Image: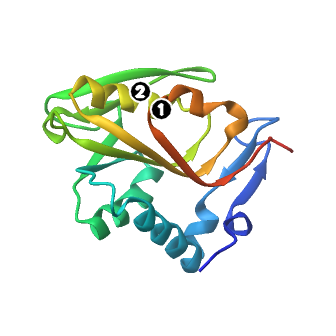
Amino acid sequence: MNYDLDSAVKKIPNFPKEGILFYDITGILMKPEAFDHVINKMVELYKDKNLTSIACVESRGFIFGAPLAKELGLPIVLVRKAGKLPGDIYKRSYKLEYGEAVIEVQKSDINSGDKVLLVDDLLATGGTLQAATHMFHEAGAQVTDIFAVIGLPFLNFKEKFKGIKVTTLIDYHDEEI
């Protein structure tokens, strides 16, 4: 079944600041048929990929990655903001539009040779997912695929992920306010 995801995405002008058009996935979550469509598409895309884990980026990546991991019978690796995970961690900083942020993954959750799918809700500049990819590579794992419900290809995110299959279900090609 095809579903018009664009109709479910809320577009909020001038958020979080003037001149930005915010693509809000909560509209997908409020429509069970839209959410079901996304999860079914993800299962279809990744059921035969021989993945060993699904890595979900805090926090909206958890929403989409968890049902996929359940359907595929795979473990979930949490990619969290700094200070949220106990024990030995991999840590990576990355640049934001107006500063820097840090993400972390527990070392015990990644094995050398793992084949990993990274999941987030929206892929814009790719900074967070690029930082996550570096942590998995540092551990000897391979990020084979990246998935986001929404992509903003006009921000050139694909250039940051050579050799990794990047999939988005809906793309917005410019930021019209």
Looking at the rendered structure, the kind of residue marked 2 is Ala
Q: Which residue is labeled 1 in the image?
A: 128
Quadrant for the C terminus, please: top right
Q: Secondary structure at mark 1?
A: helix
Q: Position of residue 60 (x, y in %)?
A: 47, 52
Badge 1, how many Cα within 10 Å: few under 14, some, many 20+?
Answer: many
Please indicate whether residue 108 sits to the left or right of residue 2 in the image.
left
Relative to the observer, which residue lies in front, 142 or 31? 142
Of all residues, the one furthest to the right in this rendering is: 177
Q: Position of residue 79 (x, y in %)?
A: 34, 40
Q: Position of residue 45 (x, y in %)?
A: 44, 61
Q: Which mark is residue 131?
A: 2
Badge 2, how many Cα within 10 Å: few under 14, some, many 20+?
Answer: some
Query: Which of the 4 image quadrants contains residue 49?
Result: bottom left
Looking at the rendered structure, the kind of residue marked 1 is Thr
What residue sits 21% from the left and 27% below the top?
139
Quadrant for the N terminus, please: bottom right
Q: Which mark is residue 147?
A: none
Query: Which of the 4 image quadrants contains residue 123?
Result: top right
